[in-house]
Image (tube, grey):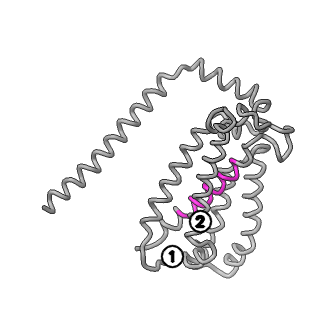
Amino acid sequence: MNKIQALVKKSYKFGLVGLLALFLLNVFYEIQNLDSNRERHLSEHYISQGVQETGAINLVTSVLYDYRAFDTLGETTVLLTAGTILAFMVPVRKARMLGTRFTTLVSQTVKWITLYVAVLGAYLISFGHLSPGGGFVGGVVLAMIPISLTITYGVDFSEYKFKPAQKKLAEDIGVIGFILLGLLGVWTGANFLANGQAHFGPGETGELISAGLIPFLNVMIGMKVGAGMAIIFSSLVKEK
């Protein structure tokens, strides 16, 4: 019976790998056969009309949160899945960081620099539609706060300051908030995750409150990415 169970488990894993391989082959095939002229037309449209239609000076942000917001939703879903799986893998018993020790100078520096990292992350998220940055970059910067605390002081101290339940709640709020904001497009009679097409108003280009829903989507992505990265790192450094 044990041999049969082991064989079933191995077959299950091989089946998943096979399905993934078929999926990737299909993706590569579709990419190879894309209409290059159509893609060139789209890129020219983004460059020439992006600011006018979305109100976002940062054209990368306008693409991520307006024209191709479905891709962004898929990316956040992947990160949510990875964070959730690793959270379930955390050992039940109390865990500690593997013997990292730093001098007083390093410990005090990390303590003082945390505030500056928080300000930088908040700035990148808030001004992501006006300048280089955005929810992804700002979220990664904010994630460096619990990560640096974990490396310097250990997992126990980091999770005392940023409890796992709080990080998971922030991650969930980010994903759910992103989806709810997307549904506003449907509510206005446009499409899911519509922004300019839903006539939310790009506002006055260059102002902080502009670009319709994009600044709020940046906040949701920042919460999701920051909490997700912190959860993943904390789960990986724990010893079983």
For the point 72% across and 69% down, which residue is it?
Answer: 114
For the point 60% across and 74% down, which residue is it?
Answer: 158
Quadrant position of residue 53:
top right
Relative height, residue 60 to residue 178 (above, below): above
Relative height, residue 84 to residue 63 (above, below): below
Q: Amino acid at mark 1?
A: Met
- Place of residue 143 in the rendered image (x, y in percent of width and height, measured from the top left): 63, 62
For residue 224: magenta?
yes
Question: Looking at the rendering, in which quadrant would you find the C terminus?
Answer: bottom left
Instruction: Judge left or right: residue 228 versus residue 240.
Output: right
Secondary structure, mark 1, is loop
**Which residue range is magenta in the image?**
217-231
Label 2 sits on residue: 167
Quadrant position of residue 154:
bottom right
Q: Looking at the rendered structure, which numbered label has been put on residue 97? A: 1
Camera-side residue: 152 or 18?
18
Question: Looking at the rendering, in which quadrant would you find the N terminus?
Answer: bottom left
